[in-house]
Amino acid sequence: MAKKVKIGFVGCGGIAEAHLQGLSTHPDVSLVAFCDVNEKRTKIVQEKYSKEAETFTDAETMFRNVELDGVYFCLPPFAHGAELLAVKYGVPFAVEKPVNLYEDQAREIAQAVDEKGLMTSALYMNRYRKGIQTVREMLKQDPAIFMLGGWIGGSPRGAGDSGIMSWWIQKDKSGGQFHEQVTHTVDITCFLCGDVIEVHAYGAKGFNKGVPPTYSIEDATVVNLKFASGAIANLWASASSNGGGGGVTLNVYANDFTALFSGWEHSVKILRAGQNPEEIPGEGNIFSIEDDAFIQAIKSKDPSKIMATYRDGFKTMQVTLAANKSMEIGAPVSVQ
Ligand SMILES: NC(=O)c1ccc[n+]([C@@H]2O[C@H](COP(=O)([O-])OP(=O)(O)OC[C@H]3O[C@@H](n4cnc5c(N)ncnc54)[C@H](O)[C@@H]3O)[C@@H](O)[C@H]2O)c1
């Protein structure tokens, strides 16, 4: 029987489970270690996904004691840094978006990864979608001029004291909705159009009622992006659609076509003058597709099927952090 890929997890909360559901039945994967500062979470995932796995509350102890072929970091934005252990121990890693909250720490990790030549995957699952890849190919011939999009959800009135909603609503933990959530849309625009060179953002605060006292993110953000290609984008985040009308959108306008992405699954309708629209539905099992690319890359030692590296994730993060900086100083910010 072929050797299985031994996988560990650091951070065993909500998104870790989304990956574990597929990985626990993947024929090439053996789940061998679960680490979380909350021991209860390690026991829950051990019980559900791999009774043979060892559990830890400290990442260094896990790396020292378990032989790993790959590791997932599924941590809140403020809790990164253990990626340096993966570099130290030479373990390829996958990391959930956004890859960090602190630019200096992420730059140090990106440099260490590059110096070691370590295989990494920044988990921007939308890059694996057929619709996104189709539009990306079309844009190589007919570049994007303008993009419009973002995420609008309801006010987090029922946010609890544990899980994602406890840290998501705190600006100094999540980085805010644009950094934490609309990072997906920013990443797609970078995948489609290349590097962003300048960012100008506005935020609205103090409107949302009935939210927990720890709520400190913007109620809404609008962000203008300028790309090195000359294209421009206007993206937004808001937690305000309590009366309806929210959702996930990205419109891409080029000379000869328009691509309208909608919904979490990013189904796309491609419009061309005088032709019937072409529709490509978004994949529901996108985490399994993204995870399989990482597992096959480890098995074959060939990273070519990985659509976003740590360095790509770092670049996307620089854009969303520039938006935060722009809101803070009230002026455009360049991205280097
Ligand atoms: N790709 C997607 O669509 C998607 C969806 C949801 C969340 N996410 C991202 O995944 C990340 C985690 O989100 P989540 O929903 O799983 O949050 P969560 O709060 O449900 O889980 C995070 C887990 O990390 C643990 N943790 C915190 N600090 C730790 C540390 N230093 N070492 C080990 N464990 C630690 C917590 O105890 C918790 O169990 C976030 O960056 C979020 O943006 C991505």
Image (cartoon, rainbow, N blue to C red):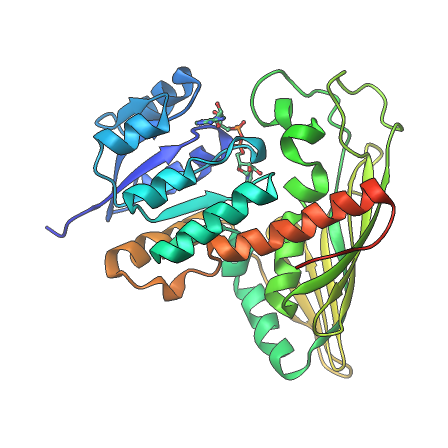
Please tell me which residue is depicted at 67% across the width and 36% down the height of the picture: 175
Please tell me which residue is depicted at 67% across the width and 55% down the height of the picture: 186
> Height in image: 250 above or below 244?
below
Work out whether residue 298 or residue 172 is closer to the camera in this orientation and state it: 172
Work out whether residue 274 or residue 170 is closer to the camera in this orientation and state it: 170
Horizontal side of 166 relative to 271 (left or right) equals: left
> Height in image: 325 above or below 240?
below
Q: Position of residue 42 (x, y in %)?
A: 37, 22
> Height in image: 302 above or below 153?
below
Q: Position of residue 218 (x, y in %)?
A: 80, 34
Q: How many marks?
A: 0
Residue 335, by quadrant, is bottom right
Please tell me which residue is depicted at 87% across the width and 46% down the height of the picture: 330
Q: Is residue 221 visible?
A: no
Q: Is residue 109 visible?
A: yes
- Toward the left, the furthest residue is 1
Q: Position of residue 197 (x, y in %)?
A: 71, 63
Horizontal side of 109 relative to 324 (left or right) equals: left
> Height in image: 266 above or below 287?
below
Residue 241, by quadrant, is top right
Residue 247, by quadrant, is top right
Please tell me which residue is depicted at 62% across the width and 59% down the height of the picture: 188
Quadrant housing the C terminus: bottom right
Horizontal side of 308 relative to 196 (left or right) equals: left
Q: Position of residue 7 (x, y in %)?
A: 29, 40
